[in-house]
Amino acid sequence: MTTEYFHFLGILGVAFFAVSGTLLGHEKKINGFGVVVVACLTALGGGTIRDVVLSQPIFWISSPDYLLSTYAAIIGTILFIRYMPPLSNYYFIFVDAVGLAIFNIMGIEKALIEGTGMIIAITMGMTTGIFGGLMRDVVCREIPLVMQGDVYASACLAGGLTYAALFSLDAPYAWCILGSVVVTVVLRAGATRWGWRVNLFKKRQAAPSDKEQ
Amino acid sequence: MTTEYFHFLGILGVAFFAVSGTLLGHEKKINGFGVVVVACLTALGGGTIRDVVLSQPIFWISSPDYLLSTYAAIIGTILFIRYMPPLSNYYFIFVDAVGLAIFNIMGIEKALIEGTGMIIAITMGMTTGIFGGLMRDVVCREIPLVMQGDVYASACLAGGLTYAALFSLDAPYAWCILGSVVVTVVLRAGATRWGWRVNLFKKRQAAPSDKEQ
Amino acid sequence: MTTEYFHFLGILGVAFFAVSGTLLGHEKKINGFGVVVVACLTALGGGTIRDVVLSQPIFWISSPDYLLSTYAAIIGTILFIRYMPPLSNYYFIFVDAVGLAIFNIMGIEKALIEGTGMIIAITMGMTTGIFGGLMRDVVCREIPLVMQGDVYASACLAGGLTYAALFSLDAPYAWCILGSVVVTVVLRAGATRWGWRVNLFKKRQAAPSDKEQ
């Protein structure tokens, strides 16, 4: 049953990220099949890096479902954009946050199955969650979301710790997933809404000399 | 014989992309060995990703011919730039298009040999063709060619479909290759010359509110 | 003993690059855990690509020491930045150069152990040394150090040739390492101090028409 959950989560995750890639591509006025390239990169990039690093077969080569889900999400989003009223940027943040939360869990899970320790598993979760969106932003010449100083990698980390905590309490698998996704998405959405920030360099940021530098 | 063709195509493909990387590096005023780095990334990047994703040994580690071809093309291009009249930008587009066409075929071919279905094979062809140039453009801080909205990924896709069609008609191998390369290069060159575009978001692009956004 | 040296060098190399990633992240005003992401990418990126290309298990998955060293270096640098006087940019150049020199050697060494020829080994050394910093600069939207035309890839190449020369003269392992690191760091620091450059395109650069282009 775990495997089925895992497969379903993956199908869902690539679809969310494919939507986010298509939305950003459209916003950046990329037209033609370049949008498909950036959406595929977003949807499949993080998981590909995860599988490469864990020396596993690449997930979208093993099962064509992932590619079909990606292409279906891209086509759906393009049709939506063509025929429906424009969406606010908030939907982009939300879709990206759900993709982040799902891939975070999948990275942790797959690393644990490979028998790594928890510190490596949490690092792999963040890698899987963050890198698809990071490559999307780099290719679109945006300031990467993860570098903008909002709660992003922190939300991912909090979701990962939630998953680890629930898992070690022997909570049912669906609860572990749901708890982790809710924590990540709520932190990310709340941070965007109310401007929460995590300051690691508090002292320097507050200094008046900061502007000159 | 197929293996020989394949090897020869690869040698040719890396040379074309090495030239395109050197040309862009020169245009961006990168001097010193940074040009060699960007040219190697362009020439070897797409195929490296292909081999990693297909869990194959990396092509330029298995056979040193590819590295020698890359370095020879870089040195030749540098000498040409130093001692010959400047080239128009059109040559860059052409060289990049031939590299794209060749690597597209090689990606499809190698995926099919690994036993993947046609949808994955065509995706792998586009990955192999597009990613070397994409990394070149990202590292040089250019708007990636594939994101500029000209016919680029579309030309790659058309070349891939041509290859698949000729292949399934049992055409001789040389014809499959030639047909696919001609389709890709002609579409790409024609699009650059006459400004052909593929519009996926027709409705929004035509809207007058587009400018404000 | 060679294995121990190798392990120790790796621990040291990731720490240097983690410091350089944290420093650049701070300079670019990335706050929150985005800094951790960019520092990890810098510290682990080059070696990860090396291991993937050589079809080896990824070094930081096999042994958690590397991740611990990375995180310790990040935390140390953050504390230093918070509570100590600001550092000049020269420290960043120096730390980056030491990381470059160490990973250069590790790439060459690991390729030779895998039985590749010297031309592939030197290419792998440059890949390992350069790519962590290259990804750091791309993600931070800086002009990559390796593309700025200073002595960078050239210093890496000179360090690699020094290592190869000392190695073939049967010098003790510690001397090979020390000689190579000194050559790379001195060339890099000297180039920054006195503006040395390697000009591959001398003729065009000197031309008066250069400005218009």
Image: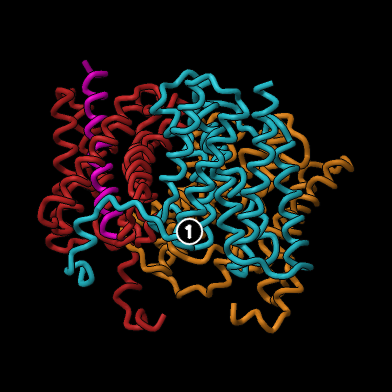
Chain colours: A orange, B red, C cyan
Q: Quadrant of residue B8?
A: top left
Residue at image point 18% right, 51% down = B81
- For the C terminus of chain B, which image quadrant? bottom left
Location of mark 1 (residue): C192
Q: Quadrant of residue C174?
A: top right
Residue at image point 32% right, 45% down = B39
**Chain of the residue displaying label 1:** C
Q: Nearer the viewer, residue C144 or A97?
A: C144
Q: Quadrant of residue C212?
A: bottom left
Place of residue A47 in the rendered image (x, y in percent of width and height, measured from the top left): 56, 42
The stretch drawn in magenta includes residue A120: no
Q: Is there any visible trace of residue B109 in the rendered image? A: yes
Place of residue B110 in the rendered image (x, y in percent of width and height, measured from the top left): 35, 27
**Residue B88 in the figure: left or right of residue C153:** left
Give the amino acid type for the residue marked by disc 1 in the picture. Thr
Callout 1 secondary element? helix
Residue at image point 55% right, 55% down = A16
Q: Magenta segment range?
A: B1-28
Q: Is there any visible trace of residue A106 in the rendered image? A: no
**C192 is higher (above) or lower (below) than C66:** below
Residue at image point 62% right, 47% down = A127
Q: From this viewpoint, which residue is outermost toward the top? A: B1
